[in-house]
Image: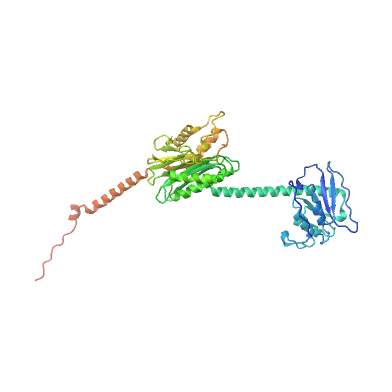
């Protein structure tokens, strides 16, 4: 019967603390009695305790948590509980001779393994290292000093291999998480719109790409541009996942034709079903901009009001008196939609509270909405627009805070740089002027000078 696979220790054997005693499990069957293990002296205060098994079945019982290294005799009879199988995944041209080693590597993947073989079989010894052993020893040259050094080397090498594998797995997992999080960030759907778009996103979690803040922008077939920004309370991965769910739900509901109170009421139902605790809530700000770009509908659910800057006028906050509560706080809440005039040329900035809750200097004073409005107005006065404006705003907030912000930050900027209606009217006027000019040229009488230049041919008298 094959040996049962023992439960592996919680801390791998290869992670033995330096200077601690080591335990060696020797697996060998020597019916002639010619093989003997040399006495192992203590080195640098470390003793090596030896435990012996005559076959793999017995080794399975002796392979306990305190074993640090295994010394396996490759000449162990093939009937000792091992057999080569295709499932080992370590294909070898000498699978039968390495069957015992493959079995040990399978039942003790976290332990250092030394292969013991005859001096005239160096090829088999090298093959043993290739399939997973940390080192090999020749039976005829075995002495206490060489064995003691090989044991310590094998344990340290196994520890290094385990650490390297863990680092590789961690790096691959981090890359996979980054790809996943990057794929969950929104791609604006603004085809056919003449509005400028820019966004910046900084999660508060260390080494993360996604936080509890979320935003999105879409243009529906009627030409209306819908924008949204929100914030789930908290900063962990659960909050980030809930933010993604709310964003996707908002996009689907918007493309289905919902807006205002109806949309927010449905989003609250999504939040109530998906949140981990009844204490979790989310703030939200939605804006739907009319196709002509001059008007917008605004809904606030416990969220800071957007900032607007019009040509020739100082930046200010849009009205926020008619806002409703955050999603998830009141089961029968309502969110009125307020109509606001945007004008011909404007910049509309939506943001989360991470942008305004940064500290100013060493005290407890926060930047606040008024401070943010003054900061953005100053940067607009310097001619910054779009991506440059958002980069400058986030950098300035970090500078005032004296370092990285601990909260998530999301900022979205929509812009209309010119009065498109006025430009179109002027273009139509120019077209009408050109048409009148061409018509005047066609209907103008021929000048007399041109008429006199035409020769007059006298009429010929018909022959008699």
* 131 sits to left or right of 173: right
* 6 sits to left or right of 381: right
The single residue placed furthest to the top in the displayed view is 363
Q: Which residue is at the front of the view, 134 or 176? A: 176
Q: Residue 294, position in %: x, y?
A: 38, 42
* 215 sits to left or right of 9: left
The single residue placed furthest to the bottom in the displayed view is 464
- The quadrant in which the C terminus is found is bottom left
Q: How many badges with numbers are in the image?
A: 0
* 445 sits to left or right of 173: left
The single residue placed furthest to the right in the displayed view is 33
Q: Residue 112, position in %: x, y?
A: 78, 50
- The quadrant in which the N terminus is found is bottom right
Q: Which residue is at the front of the view, 423 or 45? A: 45
Q: Residue 32, position in %: x, y?
A: 91, 59
Residue at position x 47%, y 35% from top? Answer: 376
The single residue placed furthest to the front in the displayed view is 332
Residue at position x 56%, y 48% from top? Answer: 182
Query: What colouring style does the render use?
Result: rainbow
Q: Is residue 136 visible?
A: no
Q: Residue 76, position in %: x, y?
A: 83, 59
Q: Is residue 96 visible?
A: yes
């Amino acid at each position: 019967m094959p040996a049962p696979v023992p439960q592996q220790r919680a801390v791998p054997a290869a992670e033995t603390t330096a200077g601690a005693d080591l335990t060696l499990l020797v697996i060998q069957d020597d019916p002639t009695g010619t093989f003997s293990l040399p006495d192992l002296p203590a080195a640098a205060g470390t003793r090596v305790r030896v435990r012996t098994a005559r076959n793999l079945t017995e080794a399975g019982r002796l392979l306990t948590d305190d074993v640090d290294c295994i010394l396996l005799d490759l000449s162990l009879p093939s009937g000792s509980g091992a057999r080569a199988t295709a499932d080992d995944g370590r294909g070898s041209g000498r699978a039968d001779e390495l069957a015992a080693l493959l079995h040990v590597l399978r039942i003790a993947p976290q332990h250092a393994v030394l292969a013991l073989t005859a001096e005239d079989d160096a090829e088999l010894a090298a093959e043993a290292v290739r399939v997973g052993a940390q080192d090999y020893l020749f039976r005829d040259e075995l002495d206490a000093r060489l064995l003691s050094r090989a044991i310590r080397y094998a344990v340290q090498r196994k520890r290094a291999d385990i650490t390297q594998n863990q680092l590789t797995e961690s790096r691959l997992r981090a890359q996979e998480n980054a790809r996943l999080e990057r794929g969950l960030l929104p791609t604006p759907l603004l085809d056919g719109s003449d509005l400028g778009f820019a966004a910046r996103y900084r999660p508060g979690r260390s080494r993360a790409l996604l936080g509890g803040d979320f935003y999105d922008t879409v243009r529906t077939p009627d030409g209306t541009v819908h924008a949204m920004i929100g914030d789930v309370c908290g900063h962990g991965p659960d909050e980030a996942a809930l933010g993604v769910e709310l964003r996707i739900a908002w996009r689907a509901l918007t493309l289905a034709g919902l807006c205002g109170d109806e949309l927010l009421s449905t989003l609250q139902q999504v939040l109530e079903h998906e949140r981990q605790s009844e204490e979790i809530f989310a703030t939200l700000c939605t804006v739907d901009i009319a196709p002509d770009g001059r008007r917008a509908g605004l809904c606030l659910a416990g969220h800071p009001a957007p900032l607007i800057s019009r040509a020739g006028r100082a930046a200010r906050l849009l009205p926020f008196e008619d806002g409703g509560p955050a999603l998830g706080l009141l089961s029968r809440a309502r969110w009125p939609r307020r109509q606001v005039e945007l004008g011909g040329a404007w910049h509309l900035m939506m943001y989360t509270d991470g942008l305004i809750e940064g500290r100013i200097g060493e005290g407890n004073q926060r930047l606040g909405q008024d401070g943010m409005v003054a900061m953005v107005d100053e940067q607009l006065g310097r001619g910054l627009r779009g991506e440059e404006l958002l980069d400058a705003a986030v950098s300035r907030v970090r500078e005032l805070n004296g370092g990285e912000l601990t909260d998530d930050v999301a900022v979205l900027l929509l812009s209309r740089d010119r009065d498109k209606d006025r430009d179109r009217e002027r273009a139509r006027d120019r077209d009408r002027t050109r048409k009148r000019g061409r018509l005047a040229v066609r209907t103008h009488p021929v000048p007399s000078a041109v008429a006199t230049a035409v020769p007059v041919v006298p009429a010929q008298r018909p022959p008699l």
